């Protein structure tokens, strides 16, 4: 049962469409690590898609902020403006869906012959924590309940391998073979707003049977997504950063 793993779509439907087309026929179920909305101009379209197509999804900090669950004091001005805009744009049904998304970690168990794995937005210990470098994860090993955890939030595709004595951060090779004796934290990257200098939409495919992670990147119509942001009178910076992947 291969899975399509997506995260941080952020209301960017053009990027989502490209990911779905690029991965077509290579998965059975879709899992999402949060932040369906915020920043982008298509929060309702993306949320409606998630309601109809995603098997398991957890909440992200922008999903909370855009439904009024969280205060916006720690958001920068552009993020704060987009959250207020999204609050006004969401339909009541989509608002309710986002407001009741599960908090990670969320356990996924493929079948009796495969080990389960966890979905989190930020960290297994704190859904808002950013796992960027080895120092951020070096103490997590004793708290991990599964050998494999998928996380998002940083918008940086890649991940970490944890052994009893060390932590190794790795960049996204095309295919990663998971070793049974190690713990892995895997970030599929951001669909809608990559921040690793590569503007292409990011995702990952996970095969429990083969114990492989396949990272994917795909170009999309950035100009169209950016034009929607500007037409909605959202901050210009939210449109311009899509072209740079930052």
Image (tube, helix red, strand yellow):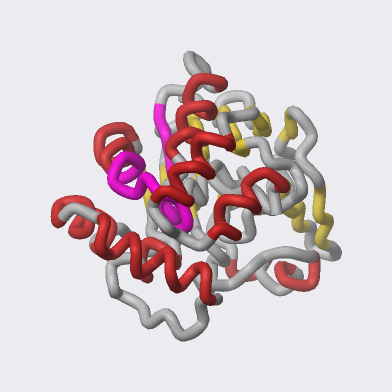
Q: Is residue 185 left or right of residue 107?
A: right
User: What x and y, as percent, mark residue 124?
Assistant: 54, 66
Give the farthest residue toward the bottom: 73
Give the farthest residue toward the left: 92
235 lies above or below 202: below
Which quarter of the figure has residue 96?
A: bottom left
Q: Is residue 103 visible?
A: yes
Residue drawn at point x = 34 percent, y = 63 percent? 85
Residue drawn at point x = 80 percent, y = 45 percent? 171
Total marks in image = 0
Q: Is residue 63 left or right of residue 126?
A: left
Q: Is residue 40 left or right of residue 54?
A: right
Which quarter of the figure has residue 106?
A: bottom left
Residue nearest the viewer, comparing 212 with 228:
228
Q: Is residue 38 left or right of residue 135?
A: left
In the picture, which quadrant includes the C terminus? bottom right
166 lies above or below 198: below
User: What x and y, as percent, mark residue 80?
Assistant: 45, 73
- Which stretch did the figure color magenta? 29-47
Residue nearest the viewer, comparing 126 with 9:
9
Q: Is residue 183 visible?
A: no
User: What x and y, as percent, mark residue 121?
Assistant: 50, 60
Residue drawn at point x = 18 percent, y = 53 percent? 91
* Residue 155 lies within the magenta run: no
Which quarter of the figure has residue 132?
A: bottom right
Residue drawn at point x = 31 percent, y = 36 percent? 49
Residue nearest the viewer, comparing 167 with 202:
202
């Amino acid at each position: 049962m291969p899975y399509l793993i997506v995260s941080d779509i952020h209301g960017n439907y053009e990027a989502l469409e490209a990911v779905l087309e690029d991965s077509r026929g290579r998965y059975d179920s879709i899992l999402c690590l949060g932040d369906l909305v915020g920043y982008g101009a298509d929060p309702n379209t993306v949320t409606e898609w998630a309601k109809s197509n995603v098997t398991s999804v957890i909440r992200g900090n922008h999903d909370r902020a855009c439904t009024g669950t969280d205060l916006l004091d720690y958001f920068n001005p552009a993020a704060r403006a987009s959250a207020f805009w999204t609050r006004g744009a969401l339909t009541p049904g989509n608002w309710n869906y986002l407001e009741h998304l599960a908090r990670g970690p969320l356990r996924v168990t493929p079948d009796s012959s495969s080990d389960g794995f966890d979905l989190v937005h930020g960290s297994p210990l704190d859904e808002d924590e950013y796992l960027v470098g080895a120092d951020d994860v070096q103490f997590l090993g004793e708290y991990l309940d599964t050998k494999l955890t998928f996380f998002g939030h940083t918008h940086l595709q890649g991940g970490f391998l944890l052994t009893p004595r060390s932590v190794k951060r790795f960049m996204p090779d095309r295919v990663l073979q998971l070793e049974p004796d190690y713990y892995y934290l895997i970030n599929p990257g951001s669909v809608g707003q990559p921040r690793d200098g590569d503007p292409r939409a990011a995702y990952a495919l996970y095969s429990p049977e083969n114990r492989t992670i396949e990272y994917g990147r795909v170009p999309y119509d950035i100009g169209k997504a950016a034009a929607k942001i500007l037409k909605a009178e959202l901050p210009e910076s939210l449109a311009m950063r899509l072209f740079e992947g930052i």
